[in-house]
Amino acid sequence: ATVMFLVALSFAYFAKALSGSYMKSTITQLERRFDIPSYLIGVIDGSFEIGNLLVIAFVSYFGAKLHRPKIIAVGCVLMSIGTFIIALPHFIIGRYEFETSVRWVVNSTLNPSPCRPDSLANLTEDGTLPQVPASGCVQTISVVGPVFGYLLGSLCAKIYVDIGFVKMETITITPSDSRWVGAWWLGYLIAGVITLLSAIPFWFLPRSLPVSRPEVPEKCTPEQTSFIKGSPLLKHKYSADEHTSFIEMAKDFIPTLRTLLAHPVYLVYLCVTIIQLNSLIGMVTYKPKYIEQHFRQSASKANFLMGVINIPAVALGMFSGGLLMKRLKLNIMGAAKFAFGTSLIGYILSLFFFAMSCENAKVAGVTLSYDNIEKISYDKHPLFTDCNSKCVCSSSDWDPVCGENGITYVSPCLAGCTTSAGSGKNTVFSNCSCVGVAGNYTASTGHCPQKDDCDRMFPYFLALSVITSFIISLGGTPGYMLLIRCIKPQLKSLALGFHALATRTLAGIPAPIYFGAIIDTTCLKWGQKRCGGIGACRIYNTTAYRLYLHMYYSVVCESLFLISPNIQHNLKKISVRKCDLYRLLQNSTILNTSISKAASLRSFFQSYSS
């Protein structure tokens, strides 16, 4: 039964981590598919935690006294149902339609002209199309989960959203296009099935795990003895086998919570982790999007790099932190100093991200003027000028083409193109009056490459990202060991549960929302919904994007360092006798291993799959 429980729990952690990380990998796909801004995506991502808030504190408190395996099974089933519901909109709404002037036709002579001088009646006074009314072993497995989540996100991002419903040869955009939407729904179906399967073994597990007496450690916490049948140290107030009334347990909840919050170290540590997770969750949520927009990588590649480079670095940091703490035999004060030191070093290294700039894409009428195509400027530029004055174009369309002069134009019409040849991705627009290259006024579909400076900077960004993530993660395990060692054993379950509740409420939910709102302020060109209103952003001011994102991260980190010294101050007030007692408990090999696993596991999930 013990082996069965460990296997089942490992699989459940894998499923949970995979679902959480896959959610973050689909952010840009959902933005484009449903034409919504980043802050609204933050609301969706944050809502992933709302269900936890309703039950997490009570489950943490009553879970130790009830049938734990069945409670876990119910949680897995509910999470599986929620994952299936996320994918449901794909099957109940119409197919994805993106803005394009390109048509898939066999005879290229039938191609319509991008410049339509006779279509003035179809446009409103501001140059936009009329609005259409709206219709309608546990440790290892837990690390593998987020890796597979992002790899699954990378795979699905390569597959077109309506695969199986449309002919792929008629799709005129590529995964690197800002209009591309991958099969985001497919990953949710896979994650839902995996999560549902993870619930099955728990229904067949006993309420308590029988363990022979020689295998029970000499020193056990009440939390261990409450789940191990036949333990000689079963002294907890409510053991797993005692049928204590719900009312009796509920009466003890508020006084127990009050005692917990009166603990100075716990309270300060709670404040510190809330601040730290605000910056961490915000950065992790939008890091793939940042890689896409700033370094002009596809969503598939950004998710792949997160899965195979960044997350393993974080996991290695967590485990290395626990190993160093054991080898160096750090006491409770040493753990606090170690966690503070790694955070400080990581913060200093993160300042170098400000210098890793990448020039914005050259888009006429957006990042540069039609009159001066040599200098990038973020002033408001007009989309309409003399070269396209004879064409009646929509200013809301986003159908970029690359001119022979190396400049990207918002649409073939705004590039002044009057004819086109070819079909699909091979379409070539001709007689483009705004391109202005002597003897050659053609343009092709998609953005102009312009990736030389980005390609040179990108490897340095990845290297610094990995090093910074590793160093910051080193302090994760010592931080949790600090929490566990200075909390009374009978309060540990509630302490960890309330910690998860507070961090989800004050970090997991709001951080993606206001980070998304900050990102939205850097948008240069918004898409427009078919039913009217602002859609997804098409191109960002990458300079402002970089500065705002890292500047806010730095401000949050600075406030963290103002609070952290209070932990060390409060630790000195704790009696040496109390901490010595907890250290004696930690010296047990089995207990020390269990707490290290729990610390690494909880820190990792708080960071990457909350």
Image (cartoon, rainbow, N blue to C red):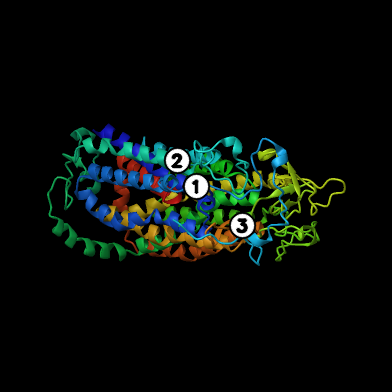
The residue shown at (35%, 37%) is 11
Sequence-wise, which precedes: disc 1 or disc 3? 1
* Lower sequence index among marks 2 and 3: 2
- Give amino acid for label 3: Leu
Q: Residues within 10 Å of mark 1 (few under 14, many from 20)?
A: many
Residue topped by disc 3: 351
Looking at the picture, tell me which residue is in the foreground, 456 or 186. 186
The answer for how far apart the CA atoms under marks 1 and 3 are is 28 Å
Q: Residue 313: x and y, percent?
A: 52, 43
Percent position of residue 87, x then y? 42, 45
Q: Residue furthest right?
A: 438
State the CA–CA distance, disc 2 to disc 3.
35 Å
- The amino acid on which the numbered mark 2 sits, given as a three-letter code, is Gly
Query: What residue does disc 1 label?
Result: 26
Query: On the rendered structure, is 184 left or right of 5?
Result: right
Q: Could you tell me which secondary element the residue under label 2 belongs to?
A: helix
In the rendered view, does 538 fall on the left or right side of 384? left
For label 3, the crowd category at 10 Å Cα-Cα, with few meaning under 14, some 14 to 19 and many 20 or more, is some
- Can residue 101 be seen here? yes
The residue under label 2 is 187
- 529 or 318: which is nearer to us? 529
Residue 573 percent across, percent down from the top left: 35, 64
N-terminal label among 2 and 1: 1
Q: Nearer the viewer, residue 190 or 118?
A: 118
**Of tags 2 and 3, which is closer to the observer?**
2
Label 2 crowd (10 A; few <14 / some 14-19 / many >=20): many
